[in-house]
Image (tube, rainbow, N blue to C red):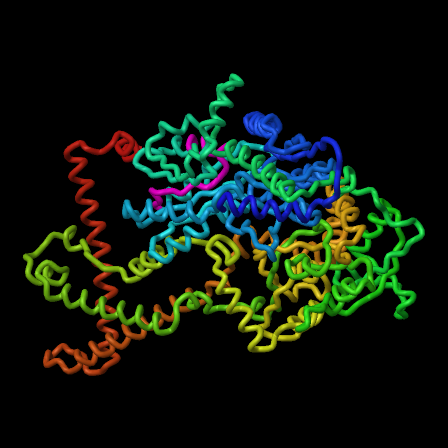
Amino acid sequence: MSCTNLVFVTFLAFFVCFRLLPVKGVQVFKLGAIFPKNNTDLDEKILRFAIDTVNKEGWLSNITLNCSIRYAAADNSFENIYKVNQLINEGVIAIIGPKTSVAVKATHPLCSKLQIPQISASATDPDLYFNSRGRYRYLLRMSPDDTQMNIAMKELIAHHKWKRMGILTASTLYDMNALSQFIGFATAKKWEILGVEHFTVTAGSYKINATKNLLNLREKGARVILLSCQADYVPQVLEQAEQLDMIREWVWILTDNAISQDNRDISYKEGVIGVRLPVRGRGQLFDSVSKEWSKIDETSSINARSGRIYDAVLTVARAIEGILSQNESLSQPPVGNGLCRSDKPDDNDYMETGLNGASPPFVMKKENSTNSNSDVEYEGFCIDLLDELKKKLQFEYHLELRDNFGDQQSDGTWSGIIGELTRKKAQLAVSTIIISPEREKAVDFTQPYYSLGFKIVMKKTDMENKVNTWGFLDPFEKTLWIAIISSSVIIGTVVWIYDRLSPYGYYGKVVQSAEVSSEEALAKNTLSLFHSFWAAVASYLEQTPDNLHPISQSEAKLPVYEKLWDFIERHGTLEKNHTAGIEKVRNTENYAFIWDSAVLEYDVQQEPCNTLTLIERPFGSINYGFALPRNSLYTHNFSVAMLELQQDGFLQRMKEKWFKSRSVCGAETQAAQEAAEEGGDQLQFSDLAGVFITLVVGVAAGLIVLSMELIYASYKDTQSKDGEAPNTLCAALWRRLRRTYKGFHDLHKRDEGEKQKEEDLAMSEGLLLPSALETQNI
């Protein structure tokens, strides 16, 4: 974003934020800032240095800037939200930070509600772009997004002509999605991504163990690895890689998020390449600011991040200066009346609260409740939460049931609960209302009380419980099986012909060789079709898929969802509500229903048990919240109260109460989930019975062919002109069987005779062991 656009957007934000009233005397405006807990003090020093510079040079007449700084863990969204609440309550005019893209996404809705500009020095998520109608109207990003980084990595790999690579990231949402554009580039260029691994990151801890993930990438043959994680984790990852001998003759490409000047110990490692923005800029003020910075005896230099923090302060100052140049004055924002305002509903006021139709376990009728609307009593997750908010905020409420959440009409109005809120017929909507950008334009939402995704539920068909004897044939289609069997027969025939015609084959050796001894006669060169078949099967089983990621992770493509929606529209399968969808799933074969994961997990655990199956991996990310009329006086009170309940563990206790304690089929569902996590049900004999049936049929077919050969050979014997030839087929067959038995018996006797000769020879030469001699003497 250019400097001109940055100042212009900031100017608009401030113009909306402050009431333009004449004020006399010197005013003090406070800037808020949120820095990471483990951060060095350079960020704070550069912030105060920038504010002192603005105040000393007199950029703003009769106005002095001050700052309020808070520290929060970069990977803890709740803590960042809480710190933003504190800054808003102090009456700050703008907020600089937090550091990470995830934290900025979590905190910006609060700033947007109160029209407070938020300036991020480090966030690079492509979703965080300015849009006057979008979700980040008051966000100014000081760094370019990850698109440029992904392009740079693509060009680097294309230059060196690398075709195969692996990806290793931290398990945070930002790190997992940082290389999503690169994966798209790799797919377009037909590069092979051998594996995508995510090592676990624990909130508040900077100790990680990526050994297992590194081993997986090494086993898959990756020699070029792209690493996306916070800079704090990089030394540990590379140290573990070095212990596994994965540094030398390997290539490691680090994203800009993984590079820090503090990681000086990785600069010497061979094969490590970093992709990042220039560390030092050369703007118009760089030389003068650096000179002033050195005068205060600071040994540390201004890096890219600290330079952006300095620019953020100048941007705020220029915005205020622009307003003052129009002969307008700025009033102080009301302290203590921001997000944490003290206004409360009057004790005697009732809040008309809208409820959506039954949405277990969040909202549902009590079992002993009557059917009359005036006497209906409700229970559920949302009702308990509403009662707890009632205690904290001291208000009364009256519940009214509505059929649906509401849709936006062609004229811009809304129906359902959202429509009643826009028309001020209700003051609060309590249900599983998804917070979406479209709804946020019409109503206000509290902080989310439940985060979840989407899942797919299907009917557990009878086929899942039936024995599939021939299930081992399912991996290949019929034509492929025919091709495999035909090729086996052809190859066997060709090998047999070669074996008979070649002088080096078994048949040729026997026919064209002189008489051999008994030991040589017993030697055999045979080809076992059975062993060759299972060797081929084993080679197939050893091959694993390169990627096992669901549609929702880094390889997901939006066109998939577009096709899904197109199918639903064309076939008219959009259900009115989740109750109708679940009922249709239970009564319809080959029907899948997509809904909120929390609701489906509850339905699957209800009677009748063992009738529904749930696709375990969720996709997408959504949040539930309570809705209030636009610019409601109570929105912020509810948000703060929900944050406090989340911090106190109340919401977690409600999850335990309504999802685990109320589960009717909990034990059975848990057993199924554990079996799924362990890799599926254990194979039984019936699952592979078809293999043994095929083997028995093959043996029987072989016996039939052998019988036919014997009968044919016996018939040929009866046609012989030899005077001793048998006259009947039965006699000929009996003679052949008798010869076979006699030949086997003679061979066995000959083996015993040869063994006795060897023992006699050994005794004559004194070669028997002492133990054998003693035994014979006894």
Dividing the picture into quadrants, the one containing residue 693 is bottom left
**Magenta stretch containing residue 749, yes or no?**
no
Image location of residue 120, percent across then percent down? 56, 41
Image location of residue 429, percent across then percent down? 78, 59
- Residue 10 shown left or right of residue 761 in the figure: right
**Residue at x 39%, y 49% (from the top left corner):** 151
- Residue 144 shown left or right of residue 120 in the figure: left
- Residue 491 shown left or right of residue 269 in the figure: left
Q: Nearer the viewer, residue 776 or 95?
A: 95
The image shows residue 549, relative to residue 284, as above or below, that is below
Dividing the picture into quadrants, the one containing residue 149 is top left
Image location of residue 406, percent across then percent down? 72, 67
**Magenta stretch containing residue 228, yes or no?**
yes
Q: Nearer the viewer, residue 774 or 425?
A: 425
Q: Nearer the viewer, residue 764 or 279?
A: 279
Magenta stretch bounds? 221-240
The image shows residue 765, relative to residue 636, as above or below, that is above
The residue sitting at the right extreme is 348
**Residue at x 92%, y 65% (from the top left corner):** 375
